Amino acid sequence: MKDTFKHKGLRNKLVATLASKGITNSAVLKAIGSIPRHLFMDSSFLDHAYQDKAFPIAASQTISQPYTVAFQSELLEVNPGNKVLEIGTGSGYQAAVLCLLGAHVYSIERQLELFKKTSKFLPKIGYVCKRLIFGDGYKGLPDEAPFDRIIVTAGAPFVPKPLMSQLKIGGRLVIPVGDEDQIMTLYVRKGAKEFEKHELGNFKFVPLLENKS
Ligand code: SAH
């Protein structure tokens, strides 16, 4: 599968759509303009890769809508060199965006099939994360904590305590909170026990599942 001029043209249109919907961070727009999203999707959806929509990937999961990826990435305010933890690797698309923003990416996925597929695929197309982990994101990644930024890409019924405690002071946690629908929520850690909370609109994600194994 190749990246062609046609794909590049479609990506430029997608970037224009995201800008018209209010995304302003130029590094985020540039990342979305350069990542071949069609390569992250099953062949039956290739024609739709550059529409601003979520699509099914393996294991009944979804690759998030580009607007959602852009919105979360913008809220995260990644600086180059930041240590970033992602919960819900999925297709690896959001992780690729984080890589292009200069983050050192640690990403956790609980579906073995997706973990295996994405662990092979991402480096193959040039996106190298610090670590991809097969495990339960509710626990975070204590052996690598603290993190400058944490992003959750599945709908969390509540905010897992370990994610709060694994955030650096001054760090940002972006997490969609809720059962059916979620409210995009940003926590900024101001001190050991002090968090500033911002709620930023409604979204719909696949659920953050508790580990049943
Ligand atoms: N960031 C992904 C979005 C994938 S959808 C992308 O860009 O494609 C959310 C992902 O979260 C799914 O792959 C799902 O399997 C995963 N997930 C759900 N519960 C989880 C948990 N407790 N720990 C880690 N990953 C989880």
Image (spheres, grey):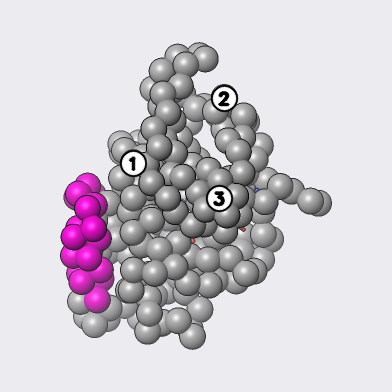
Tell me which amino acid carries mark 1: Leu
Residue 141: name its quadrant: top right
Q: Is residue 148 above or below residue 28?
A: above
Name the mark nearer the viewer: 3 or 1.
Answer: 3
Name the mark nearer the viewer: 2 or 1.
Answer: 1
Left or right relative to 136: residue 117:
left
Disc 3: which residue = 155
Disc 2: which residue = 165
Disc 1: which residue = 75
Q: Give the CA separation, mark 2 to mark 1.
A: 20 Å
Name the mark nearer the viewer: 2 or 3.
Answer: 3
Q: Picture coordinates of residue 85 (x, y %)?
A: 50, 40
Callout 2 secondary element: helix
The stretch of residues the image draws in magenta is 10-27
Q: Picture coordinates of residue 94 (x, y %)?
A: 43, 55
Left or right relative to 112: residue 176:
left
| Residue at 37% in and 75% down | 49
Give yes or no for residue 166 being in the magenta stretch: no
| Residue at 41% in and 82% down | 46
Q: Give the CA separation, mark 2 to mark 3.
A: 19 Å
